[in-house]
Image: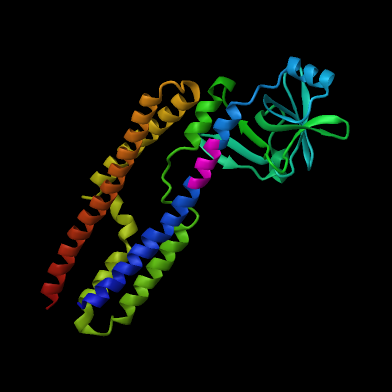
């Protein structure tokens, strides 16, 4: 097997099975980081209640940012109405960011599908309370985007649920991954087929075919042992990250403890990545040894 053939196969592997999904990982994590920063800023805004509303009506105050917890009363194509025990407030959907918290996942909402959510669904609003046509409504402005979160938990658990949903997940499987794996697998198969009629390149053909299945290697022994350890470390990293975030939000004076958990999260995630690499390497070595025995027997 020529070195250039090995480098070509390795290049396909690294780019389509590694670099391309990594782009999706970076994009997804960047969006989640921006959301967490925005959410932390939101939590510093005052809570809109009946007394605050009456004060705004009496003083005719300018636009300001507030938080509001309520339930959906009614919806239309461009508006929804949200109520709590004492207030019923219109919400303009245009340019608003909507999310739905379910099973610790944070999902974007397409507003035209909102009518499928039943009335009395819990909703959390955060954004600008503006004057429109003689009434105050929640709406997005050029400077601040309205955030609306639908949720199915208790109000006091919402912050923890949102932070948990926006933290570390298995980001390798993202919007880029299926296409990159398909393209990589196709490229490797084409490489193998192109050398199939040349006996001198048997090892190149076998190597390319083995490389096609590398994304499955973490789920077969002996590499699956490292995959199990990877999942444990990822869970530890996620738990530590959530702990650090909650300390920053609820107990900002505990900076040293928050830094400890942040560092623990980074170390555990690095360990999880190493486990995946070692697990794949172990299976590559195992399958490669079998292939080598097969080739020698063929000769």
Determine which quarter of the picture holds residue 66. top right
- Indicate yes or no whether the magenta region holds residue 81: no
Is 35 left or right of 227, judged from the image as shown? right
Can you say whether 165 is above or below 248 in the image? below
Can you say whether 10 is above or below 250 in the image? below
Helix, strand or loop: magenta stretch: helix
Which of 165 and 37 lies nearest the eye of the viewer?
A: 37
Q: Residue lying furthest right in this view?
A: 134
Can you say whether 78 is above or below 212 in the image? above
Q: Position of residue 137 (x, y in %)?
A: 78, 31
Residues shaded magenta? 30-37
Question: Is residue 152 visible in this depiction of the protein?
Answer: no
Tell me what residue is drawn at x 15 percent, y 68 percent: 292
Is 296 left or right of 40, judged from the image as shown? left
Tell me what residue is drawn at x 44 percent, y 24 percent: 247
Can you say whether 57 is above or below 96 in the image? above
Question: Is residue 134 visible in this depiction of the protein?
Answer: yes
């Amino acid at each position: 097997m020529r070195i250039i053939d090995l480098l070509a196969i390795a290049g396909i592997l690294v780019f389509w099975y590694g670099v391309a999904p990594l782009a999706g990982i970076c994009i997804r994590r960047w969006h989640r980081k921006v959301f967490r920063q925005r959410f932390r800023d939101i939590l510093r805004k005052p809570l809109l209640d009946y007394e605050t509303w009456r004060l705004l009506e009496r003083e005719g105050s300018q636009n300001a940012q507030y938080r509001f917890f309520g339930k959906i009363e009614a919806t239309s194509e461009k508006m929804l109405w949200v109520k709590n025990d004492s207030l019923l407030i219109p919400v303009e959907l245009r340019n608003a960011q909507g999310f739905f918290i379910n099973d610790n996942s944070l999902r974007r909402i397409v507003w035209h599908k909102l009518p499928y959510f039943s009335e009395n669904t819990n909703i959390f609003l955060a954004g600008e309370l503006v004057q429109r046509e003689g009434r105050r409504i929640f709406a997005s402005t050029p400077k601040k985007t309205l955030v609306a979160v639908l949720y199915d938990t208790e109000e006091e658990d919402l912050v923890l649920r949102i932070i948990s949903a926006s933290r570390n997940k298995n980001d390798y499987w993202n919007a880029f991954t299926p296409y990159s794996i398909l393209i990589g697998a196709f490229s490797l198969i084409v490489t193998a087929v192109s050398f199939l009629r040349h006996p001198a390149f048997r090892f190149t053909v076998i190597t390319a075919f083995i490389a096609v299945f590398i994304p499955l290697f973490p789920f077969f022994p002996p590499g699956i042992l490292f995959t199990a350890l990877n999942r444990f470390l990822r869970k530890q990293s996620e738990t530590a990250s959530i702990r650090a975030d909650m300390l920053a939000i609820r107990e900002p004076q505990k900076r040293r403890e928050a830094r400890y958990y942040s560092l623990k999260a980074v170390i555990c995630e690095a360990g999880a990545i190493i486990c995946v690499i070692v697990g794949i390497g172990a299976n590559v070595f195992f399958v490669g040894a079998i292939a080598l025995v097969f080739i020698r027997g063929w000769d």
